[in-house]
Amino acid sequence: MSSRAQLGGAATAPETNGSPAALRTPVEAGGSDGRQLRFTGVTKRYQDFEAVRGFDLDVRGGEFLTLLGPSGSGKTTVLSMVAGFQSPTAGSIHLGGQRLDRLPPERRDIGMVFQSYALFPHMTVQRNVAFPLRMRGIRGAELARRVSHAIDLVQLGAHSHKYPTQLSGGQQQRAALARAIVFEPPVLLMDEPLGALDRRLREAVQFELVNLHRQIASTIIYVTHDQDEALTMSDRIVIMNEGRIEQVGTPREIYASPANAFVATFMGESVEFRGRVERIADGICTLRSADGVHVQGRNGPGLAVGDEAVVVVRPERITLAPAADGTEAAGVSGQITEVLYMGQRSRYTVQIDGGSVLHLIRENTVGVASYAAGDDIVLRWAADEAVVLR
Amino acid sequence: MTSVPVRAPDPQAGATLAPQEKPASSSPPPARRSPIDRLAWLLVPVLAFYALTLAYPVVRLAAQSVPDGDPLRHYRTLLTEPLYLEALGRTFIYASVAMLGALIIGYPLAYLMSHGPRLARAVVTTLIVIPFFVALLVRTFGWMTIFARNGPINKLLLGLGVVDEPVQLMYTQQAVLLGMIAVLLPYMVLPLYTVMRRIDPRLTQAANGLGAGGPAAFAFVFLPLSIPGVLAGCVLVFMLGLGFFITPDLLGGSGEQVYPVLLNRTLTTAVGEPAFASAMSMVLLVASFIVLLAVSRVVPLSAIWRPESAAVSRRSGRALDAGWRRVNLLMRISRLPSIVYRAPGHVLAGVGLALCLVPMLAAVLMSFQRSTFAEFPSTDLTTDWYREFLADPRWVDAFLTSIRLGVVVALVVTTLSTLAALALVRGTFPGKDLIMGVIATPLIIPSVALAFGLYLVLFNLRLDGTFAGLVIGHAIPAVPLVTLILVANLRAFDYRLEQAARGLGASPLRAFLTVTLPVLRPGFLVAAFFGFLTSFDELVFTISLAGTGLRTLPLRLWEDLHVRFSPILAVVSVAEMLVVITVLGVVALMMRLRQRRTGMKGSIL
Ligand SMILES: Nc1ncnc2c1ncn2[C@@H]1O[C@H](COP(=O)(O)OP(=O)(O)O)[C@@H](O)[C@H]1O
Ligand SMILES: [Mg+2]
């Protein structure tokens, strides 16, 4: 599934004529895409603390890649090493086949939107946006044309003569964006650019950013700690934890097939059943929990009969059925102990036979049965909708 | 100065939504007459004090300067005699040179203090804060020992074979100018530092990322943002330079002198001609006033005590449009190894630190030398002078008088300033900026002239030559400093704590006493200590007001320096420095305590 299609309706091919084309960085000779970024064994150590360790990643040209992880997981440090504000303790970073990590920041040609925006307070929006072009010796009509084009792209035309303190948070964010794309960098870095905006504005800008990515040719590396943001915007997501990569994949892969328990719990709600592996057949693994209940899921890597493991399943993949429905299909039986009505949805608290308690949220849609406290029920899911992890 | 403890700048502050910028002066919501307005009455004591010690003395000076018969006689003399005109012109030139010199040396120092490596920050800050509070006189004394005929510079030149006999360094124009630059340097560095500290280092980083190398990022981003500090520092140093007489008097001898030196000599010698002295004072006051008026057309004067105003850096941002043409040159310089373009700054900062440190070290060394001539360095060391100092009741009395005076001044000034600061921070009445400006004036108008006016007033009240008279005189320079510190402290205080106390049932006064005061107590103590130090170092008002009986430590030092040279004077200087350093140490400790207790950040600056 393309996140574009989901967000923007019809996913159109990038425009090929007109000014957006002018913003596209030409593919370098020799077939190597100048927008490709390659990390090889990148490590960053602060005194005795490793903020990033053994970071290996290939970023494709023109890709929208998101670094997602809890605060302190090293995301900003990775971006800083690409931008040149920090240098790796070990490893290397290449852009389009050329070694990047030894250049000073001003020679890297990388656009960056800071979380604090870092707009120059003594310059108007226009002067801020013109800054990187001036530093490249561009002036006159060419300068004016490119500045106004970038300002139009972020729809800030009406505010181009204002100073940063005269702009709202959202406008500041756009000004910072215009400044970062005006010189057509092959790579654009964004460090939690929406963190300072309120929820409603954030959603609108998410959409605009994806739209903008379609018009410019840059590879985007986007940092956030917000799972929903990552899921809706990215081509691929890199999950980071304690300076390490936990998983790389499309939003669907990350969500549906978490590589480990950290990714599973970090990415949205999940219901977990612990137990011991009893049988592995046809890629399906059956666990027997301490309560004596049998649960199934796709077999995870390196599991053998007798191992301790956990079945992870997304709550929306679980169906609820009355206990006495006559079907003999396997399931986990339990009892509803509490129902919280929330309008569009209801939240059920379920006590599994044998002890453990879990929560499920159900849409109150036509045709979906509703339950009351005290009802005996059975939980079922398709075995390949769940994953078994260590 | 503006060097006041404030909350560390919030990194997010720049990013918060500020759709419509509001002017900083928060005038009250009209129509609503809240009990807050009564806070304006708290300003009465300070304003009454200023009326008595600033406004009235100036009126007296003006009245006295126009004798019956031929009222403008003295002014005619002053404005036609080459002696006075040349002195006035020289004063402007010296003040300008001191300003530029201090700027060139002080800028890299302030940069190191605010954005340098952690260790450099700590070292430079200490080395700038200490001389800021060590008396001008003591630092000038250090320069005298360095420039002396048998001093280290001549020793070095002779040793290297550059000269055959000692060169005359004392009583030269160069000595006066170097001394002025060195002595006024901290007043340049501190406003620069307050502004630079607020410049987010990420802005320079962003400029780098956008393609600006070090020199270009400095020229187009850092420098324009630091302009408000440059202006504040320049105004402050220039105005201090206009009224400055201690250093030129001691280093310049009897030759061509600046106007304030002539004025001071007239005051202390020509007792019979108060009318002429008054006219001289008026000329200096009016000249300063004209300068301030001219300056205020370029810079809002509030920039001196609050140099972070945005308007100024905006103007410098517009000025950049002319500078973009240099971008290619700057980019070429950026390609050089960074050591090349950083070198000038490092050298200047080194010179600046030397200018601060060397005179104080010289005084310390001198105090251990056996020779009674300013012959040093030598290896013939002794502690005899310390023993002599402690055995001489004249010195011990002067020392104790200074301490007593400092304590009383600290108490009086902190009380006055607390009331004023409360009104200025909590009150909701119009004209607060103007009142703050009035309170700050003693920092920038020539105190020699003012001191003579105050002498005339106190003479009528029979307070001249008394302890009370000196308390009044010392309070004049202390009130602005202490008020600025307290205003910053009260601003940083989280007012919601007090509101919470009110919500829990405390009356306004009780909430203030049980919540606000305990939290701010270290801040009050720090302010009081700075009041103490101001008085402990004060010389200008003391010269005019002490009369014949009372002697403070700086006054006795000043008088002896004009009579004969003795290493005991170095001991006096060391004693002064020790008191200053001890007090600063205590202050630093209390800052730490406050930070631990309340999380309010702050440093001595
Ligand atoms: N300059 C620095 N010195 C020491 N430690 C740092 C520095 N910068 C970041 N760190 C540490 O490195 C870790 C990763 O930081 P960061 O990359 O900012 O994480 P994130 O952006 O994912 O929140 C954090 O624990 C942080 O404290
Ligand atoms: Mg971060």
Image: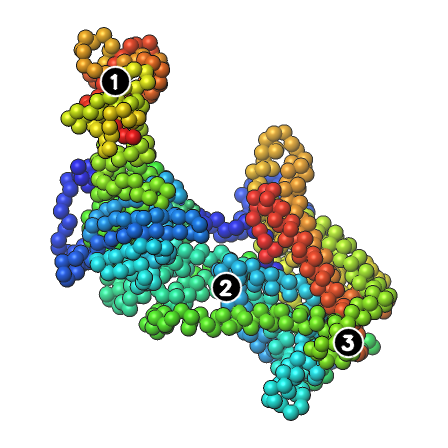
Residue A235 appears left or right of B197: left
Q: Residue at x 62, y 50 (%)?
A: B591
Residue B173 visible in the snapshot: no
Give the side of residue B604 with respect to residue B226, left or right.
Answer: right
Q: Residues within 10 Å of mark 2 (few under 14, many from 20)?
A: many
Q: CA distance from mark 2 to mark 1?
A: 68 Å
What coloring was used for the rendering?
rainbow
Identify whether B89 is placed above or below B353.
below
Asked whether the viewer can see residue B589, the reply is: yes
Tag 3–tag 1 contact (CB < 8 Å): no
Q: Is residue A231 above or below residue B88?
A: above
What element does badge 2 sit on?
A: helix
Q: Say which residue label 2 marks.
A: B111
Whole-angstrom CA distance, mark 3 to mark 1, is 97 Å
The residue identified by callout 1 is A294
- The circle on residue B370 is 3
Q: Are marks 2 and 1 on the same chain?
A: no
Label 1: which secondary element: strand
> Residue B375, position in %: x, y?
72, 80
* Chain-order first, disc 3 or disc 2: 2
The CA span between labels 3 and 2 is 41 Å
> Which quadrant of the view contains residue B552?
bottom right
Residue A313 found in image quarter: top left
Amino acid at dot 2: Tyr
Q: Amino acid at mark 3?
A: Arg
Residue for point 45% across, 56% down: B200
